[in-house]
Image (cartoon, rainbow, N blue to C red):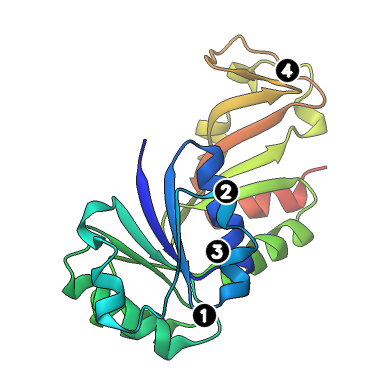
Amino acid sequence: MKSFLLIGMGKFGRTLGQKMLSMGDEVTIVDKSEDAINAVASKYTNAFIANCMNLDSLRAMDVPSYDACIVSIGEDFQASLEITSNLKDLRAKRVISRAATEIQSKFLMRVGADEVIYPDRDIAEKLAVRLNSENVINYIDIDAEYSIFEIACPVKWAGKRLADVNPRKKLGMNILTVKKANTVVSTLDGDYVFETGDQLVVFGNTETILSFTNKTK
């Protein structure tokens, strides 16, 4: 079980906190709004009404004891910046801060953030990709060039063996696994036969895979 200090209980913070709880994590939440804390406090190990721009308020929370501290504030960048700095001053093991722009990210990294996340940008980019390629179900960027995609099995692949399709050689695309309804094919070999409805988890060059999915029905 991991422990987290989650600062900022807006919509993103509430969603993140609920997911971490469902994974068995110990989560302490903080917000300066009494209403925001009272609305969800009963679900959490600890809940504090505090302004974390105040170093003394944070010091009372034993910051170094958490596996990570997440600054999920989205509306007040100055507060996010100061809280990130305060957490590092108090020897937080890991600080993850939310940003809306590249400029905000640069400032957050300068004051000590170990990682910066862009929830709004990431959702928008994923939606744009899905809207422009009917076969893309989901994807994760690995770096600037490569991604992992979940795509619908191309119609022309149905009934064919993996060895015959040979996407690694012909497309530079590695099939990691196949999802079938409620099951996952954990081990694939060349004799695997694709079926209509298969969802393929593939790895490769982002532009190459997007080009392939846009041409494939």
Dot 2 amino acid type: Lys
Q: Nearer the viewer, mark 2 or mark 4?
A: 2
User: Which is more N-terminal, label 1 or label 4?
Assistant: 1
Secondary structure under tag 4 reads loop
First in sequence: mark 2 vs mark 1? 2
Instruction: Give amino acid for label 3.
Output: Gly
Image quarter of the N terminus = top left
Mark number for residue 13?
A: 3
Q: Residue 183: percent from the left, percent from the top?
A: 68, 18
Circle nearer the N terminus (1, 3): 3
Q: Viewed as shown, does residue 102 lie left or right of 57? A: right
SS type, badge 1:
loop
Q: Residues within 10 Å of mark 3 (few under 14, many from 20)?
A: many
Amino acid on which the number 4 mark rests in the picture: Lys
**Residue type indicated by callout 1:** Ala
According to the picture, the residue beneath numbered tag 4 turns out to be: 160
The alpha-carbon separation of the residues under discs 4 and 1 comes to 45 Å
Measure the C-alpha gap from mark 2 to mark 4. Answer: 50 Å
Residue assigned mark 2: 43
Circles 1, 3 touching at the beta carbon (< 8 Å): no
Q: Which residue is mark 1?
A: 100
What residue appears at the point 22 percent right and 63 percent down from the top-left corner? 92
- The residue lying toward the viewer, choosing from 167 and 139, is 139
Q: CA distance from mark 2 to mark 1?
A: 28 Å
Q: Are marks 2 and 4 in contact (CB under 8 Å)?
A: no
